[in-house]
Amino acid sequence: MEFALNEHKIPRKSHTSHGWRIEYALVPISGKDATANETPRTLFAFHGFARPLEDLTVLAEQWPSKGTMISVHLPHHGESGPTDAKLAPDAPLHPSTFNQILLEIATKEGVRAPDYDLLGYSIGGRIALSLFTESPNMWSRVTLLAPDGLKKSPFYQLTVHSKLGKLIWFSIDRHADFVIRCNDLLLKRRIISQHLHGFCAFHISNHSMRMMVWLGWRAHRLCWPTHQKIAQTLTAWPGRMDLAFGAHDRIIPAANGQKLQKLTKANPSIHFHLLPTGHGMLKPSTVQKMIHRIFPS
């Protein structure tokens, strides 16, 4: 499903392997703080749900290290998705397979390096965590912005991992007009918040979006590393991980990171940051604050 407006699209490429097509774009990073002899880095970046890969170009404009950003479209965004007829439309993409495809893309584009940097925003943060825990030695620096994956909602668990959840979701799809009216009524009666109403309205707004939710959630169902696995992986990892949360984020609140923070409080490799923002962390001013926080001069 496409979300970028034509006038905002940047040149895209795609790579097909292991039964999957992954769409991506190469974005140069000038590295405003880089030294003349600094070795160029390669930064793989993953966007938020129902967002285009173009969202991440704002990071390339301000990222302090020079090199190349490979902005990746997650499965069922843009042209990314399964291509093998033997795979179900909602087939899951395993993190190990995803990592292998990323290595192939890097080799194809001639940006091979001893290790790579990784960045994820929102659901892209969950994917990044999964890729990291699967192959930690592949990554040198990991930056997560309002990362999903540190707390699983009961509705997600039900919808993605059970036959009952599938039945409920497709029933919502068939009776969407009624569900939308109920959502509006609950807001009018002040039974649900404006935030929850908007969240529900967005995800059930039309049939294409409802199928996007189903396929997108299902494709990433194997990308849920446990807190213990993340903490254990970080123990012997020589790199640096930064997690930035918005103090006013109601979609992925900063409290979601508390358990991991407790498990890793003695680990100098991981750093937590609280920024004065909501969930929208890709605004230029917010990106600037975030970079100043995680790349101290």
Image: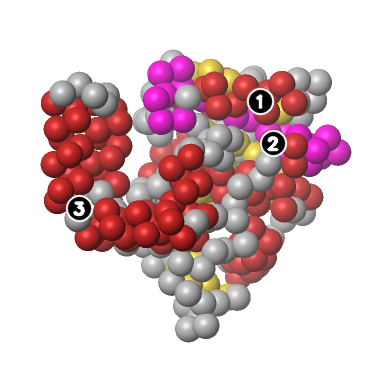
**Is 50 within the magenta?**
no
Give 173 or 125, whichever is nearer the viewer.
Answer: 173
- Residue 261 in view, yes or no: yes
Most extreme residue toward the front, as rendered?
164
| Cα separation between marks 3 and 2 | 36 Å
Circle on res. 176: 3
**Dot 3 and dot 1 residues touching (CB under 8 Å):** no
Residue 3 position, x and y percent, is 29, 54
Q: Tell whether 271 sits left or right of 174.
A: right
Give 120 or 104, whichever is nearer the viewer.
Answer: 120
Q: Which residue is at a point 71% across and 21% down the rendered structure image?
A: 262
Give the secondary structure at mark 1: helix
**Dot 1 and dot 2 residues touching (CB under 8 Å):** yes
Give the secondary structure at mark 2: helix
When the figure is inspected, residue 242 is found, relative to residue 101, above or below; the finding is above
Q: Which of marks 3 and 2 is in front?
A: 3
Q: Which residue is at a point 39% across and 67% down the rendered structure image?
A: 79
Q: Give the range drawn in magenta.
A: 230-252
**Which of the two discs, 1 and 2, labels the residue nearer the N terminus?**
2
**Which of the two discs, 3 and 2, labels the residue nearer the N terminus?**
3
- Residue 7 in view, yes or no: no
* Residue topped by disc 2: 227
Residue type at mark 1: give it: Lys
* Residue topped by disc 1: 259
Give 262 or 129, whichever is nearer the viewer.
Answer: 262
Residue type at mark 2: give it: His
**Which of the two discs, 3 and 1, labels the residue nearer the N terminus?**
3
Residue 138 position, x and y percent, is 74, 52
When the figure is inspected, residue 247 is found, relative to residue 202, above or below; the finding is above
Residue 6 position, x and y percent, is 23, 58
The image quarter containing residue 277 is: top left
Residue type at mark 3: give it: Ala
